[in-house]
Amino acid sequence: MNPSTELYYNSPAADWNDALPVGNGRMGGMVFGKPADELIQLNEDSLWSGGFRNRNNPKAYDNLEKIRTLIREEKTTEAEELCADAFYGTNENQRHYQPLGDLHIWQSVGEYEGYARSLSLDTAVCVITFTSGGVKYTRTVIASHPDEVIIVHFSADKKGSISFVSAIDGRDDNYDKNEAYDDKTVLFTVSDGIPYACAITVRAKGGQCGTDANRLFCKDADEADIIIAAQSAWRTGDYEKKAVNQAKTAARKPYEKLLDRHISDYRSLFDRCSLTLSPVGESITKPTDERLADVKNGVYDNELVAMYFNFSRYLMIAGSREGTLPLNLQGIWNKDMWPAWGGKYTININTEMNYWGALMQNLPECCTPLYDHIERMRENGRVTALSMYRCRGAVCHHNTDIWGDTAPQDKWLPGTLWPMGLAWLCTHIWEHFLFTRDEDFLAEKFDTLVESAEFFLDYLTENDEGCLVTNPSVSPENTYYATNGRTGTLCSGPSMDSQILYTLFSAVIGAYDILGGDEYAKTVSDIRAARDRLPKPQIGKYGQIMEWARDYDEVEPGHRHISQLYALYPADMISPVKTPELAAAARATLERRLSHGGGHTGWSRAWIINMWARLFDGEKVGENIQALLAHSTSINMFDMHPPFQIDGNFGGGAGIGEAVFQSECGELHFLPALPPMWKSGSVKGLRARGGFEVSFDWAEGSLSSAKIISLAGQPAVIRTDKKITVTANSKNTPLAENNGTYSFDTEQGMVYTISVT
């Protein structure tokens, strides 16, 4: 067992948060690993509660100026009452994510011993083994991306030992139809919401297998497989036929070929990158649940930290592939008909956090579903921008769904009336370019960047200081005490809005400087002028970065959102090197939040890890990773809000990466925030902004050596407090040394070796 890449348990899952996730990008399964009554809870990413609805409120524009005036006059209560009528969606809810159903397998085994349940992150293979009646049974579950199926493979060390009955069960008998399709396949269909079909097929070596009414059976076989395929009407009108064909096509291939195709596809992505942390003391080989319990008791388990990093990469590959939908609040894994917060795309941090680490972890293809969904939102966002605000461009608020719905979601002011969702998502387009230097991609997405920015050219208003600010808006999900003693949510110019807009406007300007185009010259000139008039981060009375344009106190000082530090992470507007005064204020902000109980949700703790990393504080990074593992991680390594939200897994993985390597501000920075307990380790295949791939190792907390592959031929800048030399093809590369950095030109495809002297 590899303690950094294998989840391992010696008992079946007691509940959903103990089960092991498998996924092929589109389909997901939660494997409980029960010997006699196995349960695999199934999902398909396009199964949502219904079709698109135009929810834009026609009263919005006629009341916009009244609301703005009330906010300027600090008549917040009156403004919020008017917003409740004029700005909420005409139906308060977007569509929500729903489960496919439960696959039950009743296997003919009695009492058992020698039980083991594992998920290999190296191969994306889930294995359950146990011994019953003197026979050792093995059950293997894979979710194959190339064959678009989930496969359950049964084997035993004694021929003729495999017998089971299996059935799929939905959640609403009024709409479920479940019947034999032929002598080897059962077809399960649902007509409600987005209609879909799931085909389950059985095959066996030796013995007998087939269908019995709406069940599969297998009797006295040497080996057997259940193959699961699903399709919905969201992707194809022939969803029933396509599901059956996919199951039957896979059933014509030997299991060994299906397994090889699955592992080869998965490893082509997973093996690009690795992180190794040397253990504190002896390597720990206990079951994962026991290791997590030890962490709660203060044990440092470096290999568990490395596994958390690897698990985030596993979940990305399992849940987000080209042609799928992006990862929602629960990725693709959800058991509830009405999941928490609808299992939607919450875009005031959660969806963005899902993709924070993917580019650094060398998985740019896995980000494609996010960019595809931005295009769906862009179309609807034009309608929302025009009908609600009479603005050009495109806008979305704090949530969206499978259809890219851009109207305000919920009737909850602290979240609902935030117009920055699409703007934040669009900054990911620019990040993709910074990591890949793919100018074709940038040209394809440039219109989207421009439209998102263009909305704010019309929406921004001038404040008393002559700055351009959003109005109305909110600081996501937070509430303040106004100068008149009232509590308020609506405001003008919250800090996060200005920071996101600075990042977005800079992305448009940077892209235009690369791509050019006379047709955009006037718009980009206007964007440049607007950027110059945005408020800069301000320091308040506690020495903190102010969250609002006025130095209000929070109603909840330990709030989970730390929105005013967007400028620190994920943006690069605040840096200990380039803006030390603001960095000190960012530290004060974090300390104040945490002293009042902040970081109590998993995703918030993950964000805090990244922010401490950007402040180069390895000790705080280590403390907060320990807290994430001890207090916000379930037995199966899922992040807990609670309940389960997958964003913390990805945010935590990103933060672990940021601790060992950063590439913002145009610099390659090795070991910027190394926790003291990570004394030695190695990294392979991390991607960096500028189009670089880096591999390196360290010992006793200091860099030993590194290699940089230049993928785009861009100049490189290394930040380090060590003396270094750089060679390529065994020849020294000329370096320009300046205040802790070394700069040198690179050639595309060349490998540069960094040696510490």
Image (cartoon, helix red, strand yellow):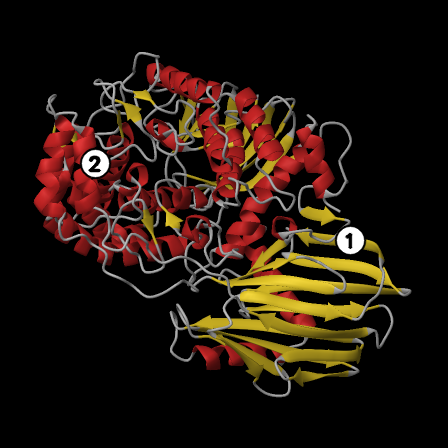
Rendered view: 558 above or below 201: above
- Pick the front one: 183 or 127: 183
User: Looking at the image, which residue is at 43% across and 61% down?
Assistant: 324
Horizontal arrangement in the rendering, residue 203 relative to residue 147 (left or right): right
Which percent across, then down, holds residue 107? 76, 69
Which percent across, then down, holds residue 150? 59, 67
Residues packed near mark 1 inside 10 Å, few (<14), some (14 to 19) or many (20 plus): some
Horizontal arrangement in the rendering, residue 547 relative to residue 187 (left or right): left
- Pick the front one: 210 or 88: 88
Horizontal arrangement in the rendering, residue 267 relative to residue 368 (left or right): right
Residue at label 1? 116
User: Looking at the image, which residue is at 24% across and 54% down?
Assistant: 378
User: Is residue 323 among the parts visible in the rendering?
Assistant: yes
Residue at the right extreme of this rendering: 134
Amino acid marked by disc 1? Ala
Element marked by disc 2: helix
Rendered view: 182 above or below 703: below
Calculate the distance from the C-alpha at mark 2 to the C-alpha at mark 1: 56 Å
Which percent across, then down, holds residue 582? 33, 18
Which numbered marker is on residue 6? none
Looking at the figure, which quarter contains the C terminus?
top right
**Would you identify the image quadrant in which residue 473 lies?**
top left
Horizontal arrangement in the rendering, residue 317 relative to residue 237 (left or right): right
Amino acid marked by disc 2? Glu
Which numbered marker is on residue 80? 2
User: Is residue 467 among the parts visible in the rendering?
Assistant: no
Q: Earlier in the sequence, mark 2 or mark 1?
A: 2
